């Protein structure tokens, strides 16, 4: 199992959007931890800001609801389409938020550098949307709230493997050994693991198809959205 620590791939300007995304995710997570101290507030935020496939796709009759830690959460219409965006900024536990933000910290700056700040933000959100659609397509009756930036960040990884396949990534392997491996191996292994778990995995609670959908979206979009390189012709 590879755990990336650092990439040898410098950028020529500060990745402000990447920093802003990390800061926003951390701020929302901290708010969520505070919400747990108020009875029903955390469950309310999950109900109305996490993504629930069955609600968006109108799979439940009027009056349907689910229980979230004993709280009441209606899942019938109208569909809460805004959760396609809001769910990307919510996370479950501290391992979830740290893992996602660590990957975004390592790989996000290079994709922001390649696309430009505004286009990177649009790219990130589109990959997150594609991830949500992929997960809903495979689990359209679900009443389990889906949260996390994993799908959008998987899009960043898909873009990275296409633009920087030979970049050297310093990784922790087997929890005690640090080696350098090309990005194509590190991120290719990540994608293969998501596909295998999506097809055959039995572990519940992880949206593998969201990871797959985001990664594929990143592959498809990055060349289309990449900044055009300027060429200069000298006049004789």
Image: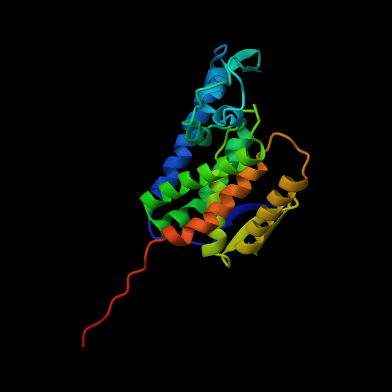
Q: Whole-percent x and y of residue 45?
A: 53, 22
Q: Whole-percent x and y of residue 66?
A: 64, 18
* In the image, farthest residue toward the bottom: 236
* In the image, farthest residue toward the left: 236
Q: Nearer the viewer, residue 153 or 196?
A: 196
Q: Whole-percent x and y of residue 227?
A: 38, 61
| x 56%, y 22%: residue | 47
Q: Left of 117 or right of it: where is 10?
A: right
Q: Nearer the viewer, residue 167 or 45?
A: 45
Residue 182 is at least partly visible in this image: no
Residue 221 is at least partly visible in this image: yes
| x 39%, y 60%: residue | 12
Q: Whole-percent x and y of residue 142?
A: 66, 30
Q: Left of 119 or right of it: where is 40?
A: right
- Look at the image and name its color scheme: rainbow
* In the image, farthest residue toward the front: 61
Q: Nearer the viewer, residue 217 or 110?
A: 217
Pick the quarter of the image with the C terminus: bottom left
Above-or-below relation of 127 to 162: above
| x 36%, y 68%: residue | 229
Residue 207: quarter of image: top right
Q: How many marks can you see?
A: 0
């Amino acid at each position: 199992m590879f755990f990336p620590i650092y990439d040898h791939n410098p950028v020529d300007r500060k990745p402000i959007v990447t920093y802003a995304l990390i800061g926003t995710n951390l701020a929302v997570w901290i708010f969520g931890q505070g919400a747990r101290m108020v009875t029903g507030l955390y469950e309310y935020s999950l109900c109305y800001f996490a993504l629930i496939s069955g609600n968006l796709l109108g799979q439940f009759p009027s009056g349907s609801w689910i229980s979230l830690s004993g709280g009441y959460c209606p899942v019938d219409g109208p569909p809460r389409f805004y959760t396609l965006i809001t769910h990307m900024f919510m996370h479950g536990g501290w391992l979830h938020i740290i893992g996602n933000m660590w990957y975004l910290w390592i790989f996000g700056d290079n994709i922001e550098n390649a696309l430009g700040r505004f286009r990177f933000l649009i790219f990130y959100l589109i990959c997150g949307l594609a991830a949500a659609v992929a997960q809903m397509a495979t689990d359209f009756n679900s009443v389990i709230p889906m949260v996390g930036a994993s799908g959008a960040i998987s899009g960043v990884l898909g873009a990275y493997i296409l633009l920087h396949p030979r970049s050297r990534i310093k990784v922790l392997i087997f929890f005690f050994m640090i080696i350098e491996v090309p990005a194509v191996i590190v991120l290719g292994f990540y994608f293969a693991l998501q596909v295998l778990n999506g097809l055959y995995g039995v572990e519940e609670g992880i949206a593998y198809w969201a990871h797959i959908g985001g990664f594929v979206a990143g592959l498809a979009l990055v060349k289309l959205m990449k900044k055009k390189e300027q060429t200069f012709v000298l006049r004789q």
